[in-house]
Image (spheres, rainbow, N blue to C red):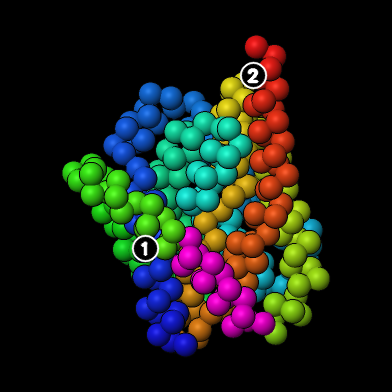
Amino acid sequence: MGTVVGVVLPLGLAFIMFSLGLGLTVSDFLRVIKRPFAFVIGALNQVVLLPIVTFLLVLAFGLGPELAIGFMILAFCPGGVTSNILTRLGKGDVALSVSLTAVISLASMFTVPPLLALSIGYFSGADATPVNIGGIAVQLFLLTTVPILIGLAMRHFAPAVTGRIAPVVAQLANGLFVAIVVLAVVLNWDVFITNLPILAPSLVVLIVVLLAVGFGVARLAGLSMAEVKTISIETGIQNSTLGITVAAILTGHEAGFPAYALPAAVYGILMYVVSAPVIWWFRRLAAGAVNAE
């Protein structure tokens, strides 16, 4: 088990982040400067509003310390490749989605560790385990930032090679994501079954509320409908693989997949189920706009 969690899990996350990097270009980062307002709204939703909403829902559902911390870990994680795919399916602004995913993913090494320490201190109280903020930041840098930058560099300096391998890498990354989610659930099966009656409803509510909050804030900000849909998806869809990995880093690899990882693992399944009708509605909105013209 130590090998799976200590080696396979981090390598799997690094490969998934590498696949994200292969889809990025330097212009994705420059776009942030050219279109700052929509990006700032999306970033504030992810970094500020998302954790606040999650915290309030955790309190409302009365979750125990382990699940509560697991929810907060999930809330601190940025969107992943999935949010980019769903944005494309929902006829949103894919360029904005990619920019948000890229920048917030790179920033996660700075944002996740201190927020994680605060959450553990609040929910665990006197039983809180000290969090090595610097150590977690370094591990996140190695597992997220470095693979993204390698993929970005490959795309920039060897576009022909990248074009050939990117589809295969994406398929492998999707397979790794499924395997990690299944392992996290199976290896915490007793805890999963015991907490399923409250875990599933609370996650469904969380996803619905976050999608709605992202949509509403973007609308109030006067953004275009494509940008509104994008920010809704980026707010509601998180990188569950990163959440599972952070949970494992927090408890130590020798402990196996911790209960902290359960919310992210179950979320990795439910996010597709809950977001499907929303994506369908977004596509209808796009079709209606075209017909109106």
Asked if 67 appears above or below 157 in the picture, the reply is below
Tell me, yes or no, whether the highlighted magenta stretch contains residue 262: no
Q: Position of residue 132 (x, y in %)?
A: 41, 71
Question: Which residue has dot 2 on it?
Answer: 290
Q: Going by the image, does 75 lie left or right of 288?
A: left
Residue visible at 70% across and 55% down in the picture: 273
Q: Amino acid at mark 2?
A: Val
Rendered image quadrant of residue 260: bottom right
Whether the residues at callouts 1 and 2 have beta carbons within 8 Å, the answer is no
Residue drawn 47% across the image and 50% down it? 81
- 272 vs 247: above or below: above
What is the number of the mark on residue 15? 1
Quadrant of the image containing the C terminus? top right
Local crowd size for mark 1, using a 10 Å CA cut-off: few (<14), some (14–19), many (≥20): many
Secondary structure under tag 2 reads: helix
Residue 59, position as x, y percentages in the image: 75, 60
- Label 1 amino acid? Phe
Taking the magenta stretch, the answer to whether it contains residue 175 is yes
Residue 11 locus on image (x, y percent)? 36, 70
Q: CA distance from mark 1 to mark 2?
A: 38 Å
Asked whether, in this view, residue 26 is left or right of residue 106, the answer is left
Answer yes or no: is residue 110 visible.
no
The range drawn in magenta is 174-189
Does dot 1 land on a helix, a strand or a loop? helix
Q: Quadrant of residue 10?
A: bottom left
